[in-house]
Amino acid sequence: MNMRKRKLKPPSRWSAVQAVAARTLARLGLKPDNPGAFCGEWLGTGKALPSISPIDGRRLAVVRTTTPSEYEKVLDRAARAFRAWREVPAPRRGEVIRQLGNALREAKEDLGRLVSLEAGKIVAEGQGEVQEMIDICDFAVGLSRQLYGLTIASERPRHRMMEQWHPLGVVGVITAFNFPVAVWAWNCALATVCGDATVWKPSSQTPLTALATIRIAERVCRRNQVDPAIFSLAIGDGTTVGERLINDHRVALISATGSTRMGRHVSEAVARRLGRSLLELGGNNAVIVTPSADLDLAVRAILFGAVGTAGQRCTTTRRLLVHDQVREELLRRLIAAYQQVKIGNPLEPGVLMGPLINRQAVGEMQAALRALRDQGGRVLYGGEPLRGPRFPGGRYVRPCIAAARHDCKIVQEETFAPILYVISYETLDEALAWHNEVPQGLSSAIFTNDLREAEQFLSACGSDCGIANVNLGTSGAEIGGAFGGEKETGGGRESGSDAWKAYMRRQTVTVNYSRALPLAQGIVFG
């Protein structure tokens, strides 16, 4: 009898992904089958929604979606929670958010890893997104003591007029897959210190990160004897949850992040009922590189801007307007940098680009490249889908650099994929005109060592985007700065010195401390 022991094969990198996923889900309190609605109690008995990891195309867990009757319960409880929460002093509300930030610090590693597992981001980006959540909590804590109005000069003698701000109501937060938790935090931290309750509809692509986040928020609320329904959740499709939410008169504000098509539908529905909307939509962002630019700096910024998150950020660099004098040298350096990008399992060290979110996204990228060729453009590097055992699930692609004209129809559109359109220009005026001609208006950047060029780019005659950067890329979600953009980007503001006003209602108050009743504009009546 042969007693030689058989050598055990080490687990493959893909079975290791599932092992990491199982440990991460367990530490975050998630199970193989989870209820997908929360309003102080956990509900969710609708159809099963599987969460599929784009890393290997395998199921992570299942979430039970929100039924119509459960949606009604969520909204009713959120409205009741708001009526109590608005009476809590704002600094006390800020204390709850401070503790939420600390709870997120404790969960940063696990929650960041779950972002990587469910959205396909590399580990550094997953952790970075949770850090954004922590940072906005810190910002909101300070803001909780600055929710003040002002005294206004009255034309009536012995009258005092002032503005004051009150909590708005229930805020609906709709988020996209590419930032599955940070956008909730950006909105929720501000809305909560303003005295609002929130109802969150996350992307159906990333339900588990939403569940994990709400579980963290629930624990903070219970520790502070606060109704956890101020952080409500309703996971479901557009018909069951999305349409109900945007058309619900109980929801005072809808804050939505996603495609321009989605945002247009949301804004029209909310406007029909005279509600408020806060939108952060498509990007199609550009970088201008001038002859005086530091090319080493430009290459690093463009690479991260175009390739990070596999080109699926709202602030992704999609257009490169480069002066004829430096075009060839910049392209040579960019292609060399692209060739060094390690693509694959985003949980592995050294990987810079993971998968696209699903196979449909891969198909849309290929359709965009076919359209580009039909319109006279050409691919300079990459663009093809990646197959084989290192790239399971059919979601991996090689990032693409393509030559294009500014007036190509496909260049005017946003394709959520790592495609960089390179466009040559001769004068800065020409570059600015081409930069601004697209319908989107989120982020922009210029690389130049010429002060006059930088100032022109930042002037009223320069970039028409909500974010304008000099000598850094198109990334732009800085805590405390305006974020949301212009034109088809939606004009929303999730942060900034006065962003809290979007989550509150303004009231003008006039007090008469005289014994007379003078009227405005000198009117005499009776």
Image (cartoon, helix red, strand yellow):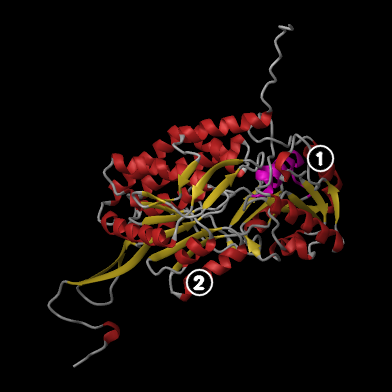
Q: Residue at x 40, y 61 (%)?
A: 69
Foreground pick, 474 / 266: 266
Q: Is residue 4 above or below residue 517?
A: above
Residue 189 in the image: x percent, y percent?
41, 49
Rendered image quadrant of residue 222:
top left
Q: Residue furthest left?
A: 515
Rendered image quadrant of residue 213:
top left
Residue position for label 2? 269
Residue 87 in the image: x percent, y percent?
25, 56
Q: Quadrant of the N terminus?
A: top right
Q: Which residues are magenta?
A: 291-312
Q: CA distance from mark 2 to mark 1?
A: 47 Å
Asked whether the residues under the numbered discs 2 and 1 touch, taking CB atoms below 8 Å apart as contact, a structural biologist would say: no
The reply to whether residue 221 is in sight is yes
Q: Residue at x 54, y 38 (%)?
A: 114
The total of numbered circles placed on residues is 2
Q: Which mark is residue 333?
A: 1
Residue 161 in the image: x percent, y percent?
27, 69
Disc nearest the viewer among 2 and 1: 2
**Mark 2: amino acid:** Ala
Foreground pick, 62 / 116: 62
